[in-house]
Amino acid sequence: MATLHIEGGRRLEGRIEVDGNKNAALPLLAACLLTDEACVLSNVPRIRDVEAMCRLLVSLGAEVDGIGTTELRVQCTRLTTDEPDRALVGTLRGSVLLLGPLLARRGRARLAPPGGDFPARRTIQAHVQALTAMGARNVDGADYALDAPDGLRGGSIYLEEASVTGTETALLAAATARGATEIRHAACEPHVVELARFLRAMGVEIAGEGTPTIRVEGVSVARGASRRLDGDYIEAGTWAVVAALTGGQVEIGGARPEDLEPILAVLGRLGVRWSFDAGRLRVEPSTLSGTARITTAPWPGFPSDMVSLTTVLATQAAGRTLIHDWMYELRLFALEQLSGMNADLFLCDPHRIIVTGPRRLRGRTLDSRDLRSGMALIAAALAAEGASRVRPLETVERGYARVVERLRALGAEVDVEEG
């Protein structure tokens, strides 16, 4: 495992380009299994999660060219197994997206418990419900085992929660199912829309993406397609927070303003000075102030993926801010480490935290327990006085490409210790 050494107190300045959306790359890669023709994805983020998904496709019989680059060519002429590599599945929550394509191509799917952040607290029940609504049958066993010997058929699906990956699983399964499928209470996030558009390019008839009701007319044979991924708005929001925390001035390119709107609305309430010019987000040195309440919500609300970073930002804002993440409690628990950096935090319950600032943070050793809180702790270390150590760095590299290289380019003083 690698440790990132950070000397805090440096003002970050410069320009940065974000990669393609991580949360779009994984379902689009899974969609490539629906056809035996070649698919090409560009502007792909060079992150550990994408590499793990590529390795999973290879373990199933696909040919994947360009692993580790921003352009991937995937062709799966023949699936050789219905059971993805267990070790890789155990590292990646997004491996659940393989269930639909496996049932479509093989009539069977065998999946070990998916890993990633908080695996014990994030079930795949919504995925299984969607698949059984289209004719899949549960098979007794320790892992997730589904059979559809007669193929999947269109169905009426109501998702009890607007799960992003649950919606994507339903879309992937419906793409080549017989007949029409209607998905209600569907997630509306930009990466769900991006998957729907990629499937449309593969010949699938889809209507309603971006709304709570999506209708799909399955096709018997999907064709190959190409897609350039949209920029990762969570990554863009991350660099905006890093700039504001360090009193810096940073220009961020590659993300669409309409995707960033829910994040920038909240950052603006905290006093962050930002503007868009020629497709680039510009963050100026800001005087931060607390805001009464920040609450996460499904799209187009404030995304849970930004909660950890926003909590760190609130430690430098004058006044008190209540942050309420009703979706994932363990993200806030991971941020209790900020108290050891001299932050004033009061954890009300697993979903709510009160932050009072500004407080001068002090460097210390930090544990990156999940992707988003890990990056938030790096941001805190950048704003802190003195030296910090954040480990393991690999946790953050799951979702942020070339993070050390980019920090150095913005003027951060960072080093990596391997081992």
Image (cartoon, rainbow, N blue to C red):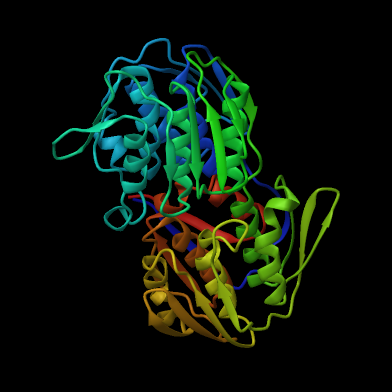
Q: Quadrant of residue 300?
A: bottom right
The residue sitting at 62% across, 42% down in the picture is 19
* Nearer-the-camera pick, 212 or 336: 212
Numbered marks: total: 0
User: Is residue 211 visible from the viewing direction of this image?
Assistant: yes
Residue 229 appears in which quarter of the rendering? top right
In this view, 140 is above or below 282: above
Q: Position of residue 207 (x, y in %)?
A: 62, 34
Judge from the rendering whether residue 298 lies leftward or rightward of residue 17; answer left or right: left
Q: Is residue 272 left or right of 341 when viewed as pictured?
A: right
* Lateral position of residue 289 relative to residue 192, left or right: right
Residue at left 40%, top 17%? 62
Farthest residue in the right direction? 278
- Eyeballing the image, is 281 above or below 179? below
Residue 190, position as x, y percentages in the image:
61, 45
Please say whether residue 7 is visible from this viewpoint.
Answer: no
In this view, which residue lies farthest toward the left? 141
Task: Between residue 129 and residue 370, name the one nearer to us.
Answer: 129
Q: Nearer the viewer, residue 190 or 360?
A: 190
Nearer to the camera, 106 or 401 = 106
Q: Position of residue 235 (x, y in %)?
A: 60, 52
**Is 139 located above or below residue 265 in the figure?**
above
Residue drawn at (48%, 67%) of the image: 377
